[in-house]
Image (tube, grey):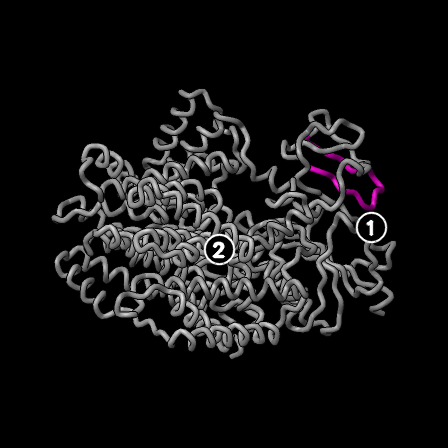
């Protein structure tokens, strides 16, 4: 209930401020896309600013959030009354009439519209019911919000996975807002859904701005909405759709600002992009392409005076970024000496390999558009597609693994995971042809301004792929970054609209409806049949949600190790019991850390720092790996570390001497190991692999209490958990 009160206050204050700031026509009425976008941007900004302010005083808690909500509401109310209580009433009836008229003129669009409504229904059902299950979400997206809640600030904390620390934080602040009041993650998927709504709202207004017909606009939105990764991400905590909505709203407001010469609209346009930069790094990577697009539009309207709105935009972007998005970049600089994060994180994700790696990355990203998510056709043609890619690389004399951080195993995707899905079949059937067609038509039909507009988005996509190609090392998971670039370039889909019904249009309809009505209810790990079976075999909705979160297999059977530890061990202990947890960097610590908000006392410790902790106050110690506990966060200055392990001649294997109770091995980006007696020329240290023996804890008064060996299921969920009991506190 308190969260709903907070949400209502944030919405009302943001709405009033937006009504004050939004432009008005000659009749003194609010109009255009600005009021709607202003409201959502102000809500996002207000939440971010609220938690940043409280974080400075380590005062993040429910009462303090509500107090700031009230302060913002009072300020907004005073300004609203002073400006004559302006009210924004969207022209929904007029727009719906226009849309309905367009649908009646094209039966194919009408069919797509029914599929679109079905998709929206399935997304709302999934977002309202599903718990957070994604690996990245439980390891760091949502996990970092849980840690912030415990410590009362957004500052860095002790954790083995450095992604919890170095990544931008704005979306996680939204998760924290929800988590703080509910102490659970229900409803968080709606944040991605809102990002999607903003995306299609902006695309609609961009195409309407350039006077495209309603049918072309609806066609573009339906095609984009049927892309596999869009459907998958609408029920996930991945933030690509969210930052796409922010970037597209920035473009929308910029276009209207230069048209109407509204400085305030430029400020909100810059705010939208600043928020995107503070949400996920691809927004930073895409900025050169987006800014060039804005420059083109500004020049088209202002000619020699185009520099004025562009300079104003850059000034506003700097100011809004510093206020609403720089918090974690500053923390990274303080803790790691670089705003982009630790040296190990930069080494893992950073671009490498020179000009040839850049060319290779570009080719591989374009080939990612050949995606068969949800269809098995790749079993027949996938090998030929990969052979074509390898033939191009071979012709250019570029090694296939040059600059690669995470390979794609030379396979064409046909799965429906958020981490591997791209645009699906419509990516190469519609998007790729639209991209090249728009550019060709802009050259061959120079008198057509609309083709120039569409081609500008196509050129932006090509520039953005280039920026992506030399910004980070190639990873198969970068398909999500590519999808973000596709969404912000979606206006170019307008060129693919076909007025007359023909075989191509019917083929596109088949795949659009397949994704809308069949694939949307059969997503891997979120299929409706398994959800329904789970609901029938459980007694409560909450029990069903937890079974889905903790499941090992499709069908939601089995229990992963952390849920097992929570349910079968920790929650059966008295709440005052104090536990030390030594996690591995891949562990989903959110499941256990959230227990701290329910009265339990679990501290996360770093294996590398194990000899320096005092353990007397702990009742139990838990380690989560059989041999080495791996961390991607480095605590010590490696050059000063004295190592006692040895390596083989190749340097790719390390050995800990017998009778050593504790030892950390330092791995490098080149799959070598750092040994202090050698010259450190094996590359940047990217992780620690720490061995902690039973004798190490025995010397500190602990005895081995239990061992759980969780088998490897589908290559994912293997864990070996040891629990040590304090002999002095558990007699």
For label 1, the crowd category at 10 Å Cα-Cα, with few meaning under 14, some 14 to 19 and many 20 or more, is some
Looking at the rendered structure, the secondary structure element under dot 1 is: helix
Return the mark for residue 493.
none
Above/below status of 236 relative to 387: below
The magenta-colored residue range is 652-667
- Asked whether, in this view, residue 185 is left or right of residue 521, the answer is right
| Residue 693: x %, y % from top left | 79, 49
Return the mark for residue 611.
1
Foreground residue among 364 and 24: 24
Distance CA(mark 1)–CA(mark 2): 41 Å
For label 2, the crowd category at 10 Å Cα-Cα, with few meaning under 14, some 14 to 19 and many 20 or more, is many
For the question of whether residue 305 can be seen, the reply is yes
Q: Quadrant of residue 182?
A: bottom right
Above/below status of 461 relative to 692: above
Residue 494 lies in the magenta-colored region = no
| Residue 376: x %, y % from top left | 34, 44
Q: Residue at x 29, y 59 (%)?
A: 517
Of all residues shown, which one is farthest toward the bottom?
1
Above/below status of 657 relative to 52: above
Q: Residue at x 55, y 57 (%)?
A: 323
Of all residues shown, which one is farthest toward the front?
305
Lower position in the chain sequence, tag 1 or tag 2: 2
Number of numbered discs: 2
The residue singled out by tag 2 in the image is 275
Quarter of the rendering occupied by the C terminus: bottom right
């Amino acid at each position: 209930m308190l969260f709903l009160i907070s949400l209502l206050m944030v919405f009302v204050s943001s709405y009033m401020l937006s009504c004050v700031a939004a432009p008005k026509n000659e009749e003194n009425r609010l109009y255009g896309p600005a009021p709607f976008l202003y409201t959502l941007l102000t809500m996002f900004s207000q939440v971010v600013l609220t938690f940043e302010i409280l974080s400075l005083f380590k005062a993040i808690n429910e009462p303090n959030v509500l107090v700031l909500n009230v302060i913002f509401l009072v300020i907004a109310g005073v300004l609203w009354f002073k400006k004559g209580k302006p009210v924004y009433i969207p022209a929904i009836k007029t727009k719906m009439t226009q849309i309905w008229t367009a649908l009646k003129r094209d039966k194919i669009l009408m069919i797509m519209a029914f599929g679109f409504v079905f998709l929206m229904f399935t997304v709302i059902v999934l977002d309202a019911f599903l718990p957070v299950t994604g690996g990245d979400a439980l390891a760091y997206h949502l996990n970092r919000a849980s840690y912030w809640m415990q410590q009362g600030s957004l500052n860095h904390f002790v954790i083995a996975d450095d992604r919890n620390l170095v990544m931008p934080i704005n979306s996680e602040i939204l998760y924290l807002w929800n988590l703080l009041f509910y102490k659970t993650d229900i409803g968080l998927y709606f944040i991605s859904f809102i990002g999607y709504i903003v995306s299609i709202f902006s695309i609609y207004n961009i195409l309407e701005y350039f006077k495209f017909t309603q049918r072309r606009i609806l066609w573009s939105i339906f095609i984009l909405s049927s892309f596999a990764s869009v459907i998958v991400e609408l029920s996930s905590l991945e933030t690509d759709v969210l930052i796409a909505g922010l970037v597209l709203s920035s473009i929308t407001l910029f276009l209207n600002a230069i048209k109407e010469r509204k400085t305030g609209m430029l400020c909100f346009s810059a705010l939208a992009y600043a928020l995107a930069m503070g949400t996920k790094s691809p927004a930073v990577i895409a900025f050169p392409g987006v800014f060039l697009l804005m420059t083109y539009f500004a020049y088209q309207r202002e000619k020699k005076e185009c520099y004025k709105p562009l300079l104003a935009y850059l000034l506003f972007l700097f100011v809004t970024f510093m206020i609403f998005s720089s918090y974690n970049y500053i923390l990274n600089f303080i803790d790691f000496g670089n705003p982009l994060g630790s040296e190990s994180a930069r080494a893992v994700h950073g671009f490498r390999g020179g000009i040839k790696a850049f060319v290779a990355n570009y080719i591989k990203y374009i080939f990612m558009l050949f995606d068969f998510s949800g269809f098995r056709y790749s079993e027949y043609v996938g090998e030929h597609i990969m052979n074509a890619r390898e033939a191009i690389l071979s012709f250019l004399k570029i090694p296939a693994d040059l600059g690669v951080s995470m390979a794609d195993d030379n396979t064409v995707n046909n799965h429906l995971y958020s981490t591997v899905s791209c645009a699906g079949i419509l990516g190469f059937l519609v998007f790729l042809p639209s991209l090249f067609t728009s550019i060709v038509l802009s050259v061959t039909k120079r008198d057509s301004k609309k083709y120039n507009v569409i081609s500008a988005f196509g050129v932006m996509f090509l520039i953005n792929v280039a920026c992506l190609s030399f910004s980070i090392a190639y990873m198969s998971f970068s398909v999500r970054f590519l999808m973000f670039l596709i969404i912000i370039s979606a206006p170019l889909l307008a060129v693919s609209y076909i007025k007359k019904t023909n075989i191509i249009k019917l083929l596109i309809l088949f795949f659009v409806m397949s994704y809308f009505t069949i694939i949307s209810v059969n997503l891997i790990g979120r299929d409706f049949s398994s959800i329904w079976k789970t609901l029938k075999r459980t007694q409560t909705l909450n029990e069903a949600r937890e079974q889905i979160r903790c499941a090992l297999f499709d069908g939601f059977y089995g229990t992963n190790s952390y849920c097992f530890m929570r349910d079968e061990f920790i929650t059966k202990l008295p709440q005052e019991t104090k536990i030390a947890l030594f996690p591995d960097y891949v562990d989903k610590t959110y499941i256990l850390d959230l227990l701290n908000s329910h009265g339990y006392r679990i501290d996360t410790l770093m294996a590398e720092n194990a000899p320096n902790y005092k353990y007397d106050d702990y009742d139990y110690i838990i380690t989560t790996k059989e041999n080495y506990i791996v961390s991607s966060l480095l605590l010590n200055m490696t050059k000063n570390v004295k190592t006692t392990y040895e390596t083989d001649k190749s340097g790719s294997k390390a050995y800990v001497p017998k009778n050593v109770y504790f030892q950390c091995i330092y791995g490098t980006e080149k799959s070598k190991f750092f040994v202090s007696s050698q010259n450190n020329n094996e590359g940047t240290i990217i992780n620690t692999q720490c061995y902690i023996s039973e004798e190490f804890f025995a010397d500190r008064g602990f005895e081995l209490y239990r061992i759980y060996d969780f088998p490897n299921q589908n290559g994912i969920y293997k864990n070996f958990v040891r629990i040590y009991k304090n002999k002095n506190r558990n007699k």
